[in-house]
Structure formats: C-alpha cells, structure tokens
Image (cartoon, rainbow, N blue to C red):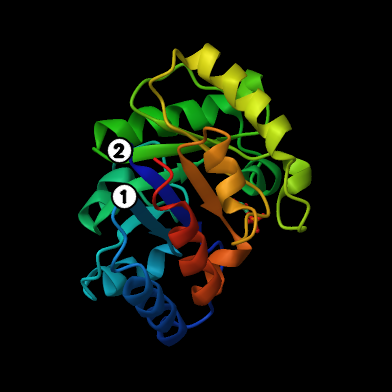
C-alpha cells in the first residue's frame, strides 16, 4: 500500500504552548491506530522541541525555513535547525508566504536545495503549473488560491485534472497532495482522485475533525 500523507499546517496557531501540547496530544492519541497514514504536524517553530518530547507517533515539519544553514541572518531558522528539532519535513512556498513575505520561485528554489541538503523533505505548495520546481525528492501540494481557508474546496474532478498535469510535468514519482478547505466530508474525494494525501489548515486545529480526516483517508493508498 502507498503511504498517504496527512499534513496539518497550524500556521500562526495556537497562541500558547499549553494549547499546542493539548492539540498535539489529542491528535497523537486519535491517530494512534492508523495503518497507512504518515501524519505530519507543522506547528510554529517555538513549539517543535516540546512537541517532539511528547513522543507520539506523529512526524514533525516546519512551516518554512531559510536557505542557509547558519550564519549572520537575524531572525531566520535553518533547515539544519529544523532537522535537529526533529523535523522530517518542511512546508515551502505556501501561498501566504508568497503573498505576505513576497517569496518568489527563485527564493523557494534555494530553500528547497538547502532543506534537501539538511535531510529535511520539502512539501512545496503550488497554485499553478509554472510554480512546479524542477527538483527530485520533494512532495508537491496543489493548493488553489481561491480554495484556501474559505470552505470552498476545489471540485475533485478539477483537482484531479490538475494532479494529472502535475504528474506529467514531474515524471510521476513525486507525491502530490491536495490542500484547500479539506474537511472530514471531502478528504476522501481527493485521495480517490489519486492524490497521495492532503494538506490541512483550519481543520488541523480541531483535533476531532483532523482525526476524522486521517481515518477517512488512511486506507486509500
Ligand atoms: P485550509 O488551509 O485547510 O484552512 O484551507 C490550507 C492551507 O493553507 O494549507
């Protein structure tokens, strides 16, 4: 069976470590019995070490990283630091960063190279074919801009057409996830449409809903 990725992007939430631990614990307990799923939680950087020490069967990911491993770069977090903090994954090129931090494909490409060299797997978010990086050993998350955070998930048929185009472009051996208003009612539509998993924003902050999503797609691989 193919591994199914269930990636929770907490974004800039929750505001306290206590809440972060409670959320992580509820998810960790809820997905304990899953067979096939690779559940990845991407919390704010500050919580990573604490969450790692809770020892649940959850993978950790960063929501971004810098493109150098160390040096005089005030405020940055490097891929090597993420690796050391227990991250196997890092989300790169999320549309919120493209918009709010003016991240370009060029910068994202440098970050991908740097993450790979530190042994952290990039989950690269794209909204259109032209944003597909020419890299191997990555995961792509197709996240149509107009579907993020508003309850208007993409029509699974349309998403599938895009998945097929991305697959053609990347040669077929890169996992492709869908992201954008995924919930427990629609999640399986995307794995049924051939996606290798899903990237979840809002619903990843509701442990019961997140666990339902994970259970819904666990056997889709
Ligand atoms: P959403 O966010 O699930 O809240 O739409 C997805 C994302 O931004 O990755």
What crowding class fits label 2: few (fewer than 14 Cα within 10 Å), some (14-19), or many (20 or more)? few
Q: Nearer the viewer, residue 209 or 203?
A: 209
Q: Residue at x 25, y 59 (%)?
A: 85
- Please indicate, yes or no, whether residue 71 appears anywhere in the rendered image: no
Residue 57 sits in which quadrant? bottom left
Q: Residue at x 67, y 24 (%)?
A: 161
Q: Is 103 placed above or below 75 here?
A: above
- Please indicate, yes or no, whether residue 174 appears anywhere in the rendered image: yes
Q: Residue at x 53, y 49 (%)?
A: 199
Q: Is 37 placed above or below 108 here?
A: below
Instruction: Name the disc covering residue 1, or none.
Output: 2
Q: Position of residue 111 (x, y in %)?
A: 43, 34
Q: Is 132 placed above or below 82 here?
A: above
Q: Which residue is mark 1?
A: 36
Residue 94 sits in which quadrant? top right
115 with respect to 10 (left or right)? left
């Amino acid at each position: 069976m193919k591994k199914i990725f269930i990636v929770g992007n907490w974004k800039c939430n929750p505001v306290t470590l206590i809440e972060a631990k409670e959320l992580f614990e509820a998810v960790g307990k809820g997905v304990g019995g899953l067979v096939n799923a690779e559940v990845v939680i991407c919390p704010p950087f500050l919580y990573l070490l604490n969450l790692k020490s809770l020892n649940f069967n959850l993978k950790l990911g960063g929501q971004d990283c810098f493109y150098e491993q160390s040096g005089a770069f005030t405020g940055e977090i490097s891929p090597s630091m993420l690796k050391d903090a227990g991250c196997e994954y890092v989300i790169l090129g999320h549309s919120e960063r493209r918009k709010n931090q003016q991240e370009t494909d060029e910068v994202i490409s440098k970050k991908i190279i740097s993450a790979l060299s530190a042994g952290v797997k990039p989950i690269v978010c794209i909204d259109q074919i032209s944003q597909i990086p020419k890299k191997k050993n990555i995961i792509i998350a197709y996240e149509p801009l107009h579907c993020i955070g508003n309850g208007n998930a993409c029509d699974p048929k349309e998403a599938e057409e895009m998945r097929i185009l991305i697959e053609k472009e990347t040669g077929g051996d890169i996992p492709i996830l869908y992201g954008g208003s995924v919930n427990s009612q629609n999640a399986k539509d995307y794995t049924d449409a051939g996606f290798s998993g899903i990237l979840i924003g809002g619903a990843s902050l509701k442990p019961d809903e997140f666990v339902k999503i994970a259970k819904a797609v666990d056997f889709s691989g």
